[in-house]
Amino acid sequence: MLKSVSPTSKGEAAISAKNGSIKLVAGNSNPELAAAISSVLNLPLTKASVRRFADNEVFVEILENVRGSDVYVIQSTSFPANDHLMELLIITDALRRASARRITAVIPYFGYARQDRKVGSRAPISAKLVANLITHAGADRVMTLDLHAAQIQGFFDIPTDNLFAAPVMARDIKEKFDLSKVMVVSPDVGGVIRARGLAKRINAPLAIIDKRRERAGESEVMNVIGDVAGYTCVLIDDIVDSGGTLVNAADALLANGAKDVYAYITHGVLSGGAVARITSSRLKELVITDSIQPTEAVKKAANIRSLPIATLIGEAISRTAAEESVSSLFD
C-alpha cells in the first residue's frame, strides 16, 4: 500500500536527506508531472533554464546553488524522444559540473526500452547505449517506472530502481469493479508475468491472448487462452503505442463471450492515429498513467483516462533521499 507524504508546515522541508539538501530539477518533457511531484513532496522545483538556440541546440543553465545537494532530475524520454534525452543528459552534466553531491535521473518513461535486444544480425541494442549515455553524463542513480523489460536494469552500471504502477492500478480496479467478475488478461505471451502480478494483487483469474501471423500478408489471429465468457476483462501492459493490439484483443475477448473489456497500460505513447483508433474501438475504457504528458487529443478522448503517479514517485524519492527501502513500497 502506498503511503502519501505528509504535508509540513510552511517553510519546513517536506523530506530530508542524510547528507545535504534535496533539489528537484525538471526538463521540458512532462512539466505537469514534475509540478505534481513537487507538490506531493512540498518541495519547490529548482530554478533552471532549459531552452533552445536558433538551430534547436539544447542549452541548460541551473539558476540556483546545488553544491553538495541530492538532486533528482525529472524527465521522461518521450516524444520527441531525442530532444528530451539530450535535455536529460545536458541537465545531468550541468549538475555534475555544479558539484551536486548525488544526481538521480528520475525517468518515468524510459524511451528506447523496446530496443533491448538484437532483432537482426546488424541491429543495435539502443537501450544499452542510452543507459551508457546517462551513466557517463554523470548520473549516480536511475529511477524509472515499469521498464519494458526488467533486465534493462542490468544495462546500467549504477543503482537502478524500477518502480511499478501495479499498486496504483490495483487500487483503481478495486474501487471501480466487482472483483468477483473481473478477469485479468495479458495481450501477449510476453506480458504474462506482469498480468499475473496484477491478478494476484486483486485475487482475479488470468487469461492470455496468443497472437500469431500464419504467413506474410495475412492478418493476425487472436487465440484466447482461458474461459472469459461473462467476465469483465482487464487487459494489462506496459506500453500502448499504435493501439492496434489492444483493439484486436478487445474484439477477440468480446467474440469469446467477455462482458466488457478495459485496458490498464502504464505508458500512453499513443502515436499517430492511436487515439482515434481507441475511441472508435469496442474498448470500454483505456486507463493510462501520466508518466508521459497527455496530449490534448488524449485529454479530450471519451474513453481514455489518466491515473496520477506523482504520489508513487514522490514517495520513492523521499525514501531514496532518506536512504530507506524503496522495494517495500510494493510489499
Image (cartoon, helix red, strand yellow):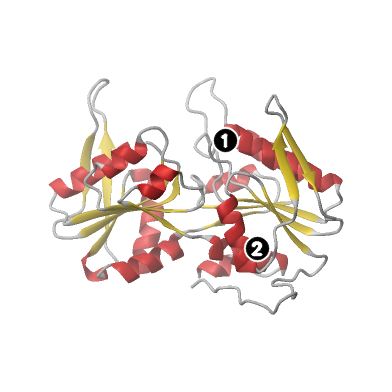
User: Between residues 24 and 20, which one lies in front from this camera angle?
Assistant: 24
Image x and y of residue 4, in percent: 56, 73
Q: Is residue 64 left or right of residue 218?
A: right
As measured in the structure, the alpha-carbon distance from the residue carrying label 1 to the one carrying label 2 is: 24 Å
Whether residues under marks 1 and 2 lie with C-beta atoms below 8 angstroms apart, the answer is no
Q: Secondary structure at mark 1?
A: helix
Whether residue 190 is visible here, answered yes or no, is yes
Question: Which mark identifies residue 127?
Answer: none
- The residue positioned 76% from the left and 68% from the top of the image is 17
Q: Is residue 154 above or below residue 204?
A: above
Q: In the rendering, at what x and y percent does residue 174 appear?
A: 33, 70
The mark found on residue 81 in the picture is 1
- Disc 2 target residue: 317
Q: Amino acid at mark 1?
A: Ala
Question: Mark 2: which amino acid?
Answer: Ile
Residue 179 lies in quadrant: bottom left
Question: Going from the N terminus, do you reach mark 1 or mark 2 first?
Answer: 1
The residue depicted at 75 percent of the width and 49 percent of the height is: 48
